[in-house]
Image: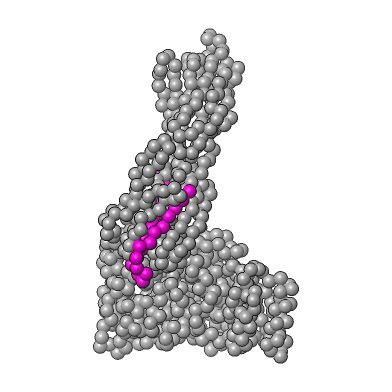
Amino acid sequence: MLSLEAKTTDRMIIKYKESKTLSSNAITSLTYRMKQTTASPIAIKTIKTNLSHANIIKISIAGKKPNLSQMKSLAKELTARSDVEYAEPDYIMKPLRVPDDSDYLLQHWHYRDSSGGANLEGAWDITVGSDSDVIAVIDTGVLPHTELISKTLSGYDFITDIEMANDDDGRDNNATDSGDWCYDGDACYDNADDFTHSSWHGTHVAGTIAAQSNNNEGMTGINWNAKILPIRVLGKGGGYVSDIADAMLWAAGIHVDGVADNQNPAKVLNLSLGGDGSCSQTYMDAIKQINATGAIIVIASGNSNTNASNSNPGNCPNIITVGAVSEDGSRANYSNYGTTIDISAPGGDENKDTLIYSTLDSGKTTPNYDNSYMHYEGTSMATPHIAGIASLIASSDILPYATYAQVNYILQETARSFPTGTDNDCNTNICGAGIVDATAALEYASSHKLAKYSDKVYQEKDKYIYTFETQEDKVDSASSWFINQEMLTSNLIDDEQNTSYEIKLNNIDLYDISFRWGVDSEESFDYLIFTASGKTIFAKSGEEVGTYEASQVLVADSGLDLDWTYMKDGALKEGEDFAWIDDVKIATYTKESSFSFSKNDIGKIIIITNSGFEPLSIQNPSLSDATNFTLENECIEALNFQESCILRVKYIGSFNEKHTTQLDYTTNDTQAHYVEKFFNNGVFNYNVSIINYLLF
């Protein structure tokens, strides 16, 4: 079993209250101040800027790595500074596994309904997931295993330390596992006792979550259709908190300086890693931002057979912390325990010949790329069971808007009771709410879907009334959004209620959208959720207001559904709350239109009618043949709602000749032109109705 003890580190995370980077003067000042805490020479080197306003520095005292006591003392001194928000050692995290035994026969007990199994077979009758489900595996990286290669997205390597990375480079977009072996003579960061072969840990974790399934070969992943987002943070000797926190943010779609933005944000983040100590402020800052996106973080409790309250980041708030059980439902002999744990899942037990089977590689150091499989045990193996089941609950056809708090509630509410009479009984005080039951969880989730509701829009020239009523699904009584002089507001809704407002956009190429929003609710439990065609854009809770903007978003021919859902989950804070949105705008873009005319269309006119809410203007009308045609343009002023204007084309050429011209004009409309040709008093007319979607 790998040690989780944070023996020492020579890196420090410093988050300043204002300045983002350390200047040379700041380094000099910092060095001088830190010298006051020790009689030995001290040196400081800037490693990188991490997160928002935070820096990573490397410290040596008398030319050597500081011990843990010195680092804690230095962190305390730095935190006391008026310009520092916090400082803390940049500890090294480890993959949480214990030694494997490759002689065990293939077993799938952990998917079935055994005492300690996850009971997945009934869940798969409800859903096998969606190809839009994305689960981030934040680990050692993932190999191109035949069971994973078609399921793996382009990820990222966040390891900054070259020696630890073991791939001769720093951060880059290659998340392939290059091996984490540690042999005698390797610089394995004070872990010289841990002589190990490469673990291919991330590949094993990824296989449990989403290996190729139902293909008559190999193994089965929990989410048959999901995509894996591989993110490498662990190398030789483990990985630093600062790198892991950056990786977590990036996985959820949050910008990280110096890294290209993630185009495939994950709904679920799996972290089968950890170390000793309390939850660091760096982790807490990252988790808070990730919770706001609606992503779900699942973390292993640790393999030290000790109280999980001392194992981070599994002891951090607002995540799902996982303990491990054996096939008979007993607490696995290595699993951490205590009230920190939310739920238990199958993690295997070498002492009982019941391990977890998944994808791996046989290479002892570098990969052999032989598409092999192996049995492992650990809370690292239990955690992907929960991550996979969480992704099924939050899948697009079940509860795509579900937050971590809701998923955790479902997992705990539907968990099986721990069996008694084993050699190491669990109970709810030490192993969480129970053993995960995927079938019960999916049955509950599918019967408590957050419904999506289409609005009815009644248009009047000077007044627009929008009615949005919920249905009976999970709502005690109908709740509607209403418009007043300032904003579109949801009715006050009570616990276990939700209400939604939806706009449908059809056949638009590009659009810009913006709106203001506000929410008054219990933080991390009750949410205003904004989605685009089922994809969560953000989820906001607490008492907060803000503005959302997106530019030049491509909309396919199938259109786009924009949905705002406000929901309360009934946890902790009771009573009615509400949310609001205001100034919802789908901005204009330039659209060119043209019509052809011939001499037979004498007196033809184009009538432009604005059927939308936004003022409409016509720019730069022109004729391709100005010799035989002239244009009279009455469309000088911008058109308001239902106003019209005329473009008249006159033919001035000879009647003995055939002439054709084309009228080109540009409008600032946001939707298609609806053209109707009609005959009226001897004149052919083209009535062009332009629909705009600017609301409020």
> In x, y percent, where is residue 606?
48, 24
Viewer-nearest residue: 158 or 73? 73
530 shown above or below 628: below
450 shown above or below 320: above
Looking at the image, what colour scheme do you see? one colour
- Report the span colored magenta: 557-583
122 shown above or below 643: below
The count of marks equals 0
Viewer-nearest residue: 120 or 186? 120
> In x, y percent, where is residue 471?
28, 53
The quadrant where residue 684 appears: top left
Residue 171 included in the magenta stretch of the image: no
Task: Report if residue 85 is visible in the image.
Answer: yes
570 shown above or below 529: below
> In x, y percent, where is residue 507?
43, 41
Look at the image and tell me in which quarter the C terminus lies. top left
Q: In the image, what residue occupies the spot 49% across and 53% down? A: 516
Q: In the image, what residue occupies the spot 55% across and 10% down? A: 654
> In x, y percent, where is residue 414?
28, 72
The quadrant where residue 331 appears: bottom left
Task: Report if residue 199 is visible in the image.
Answer: no
Look at the image and tell me in which quarter the N terminus lies. bottom left
Q: In the image, what residue occupies the spot 31% across and 78% down? A: 434
Residue reaching furthest front?
Answer: 485
Viewer-nearest residue: 175 or 602? 602
Residue reaching furthest top?
Answer: 656
Residue 559 included in the magenta stretch of the image: yes
Judged left or right of residue 147, residue 161 is right
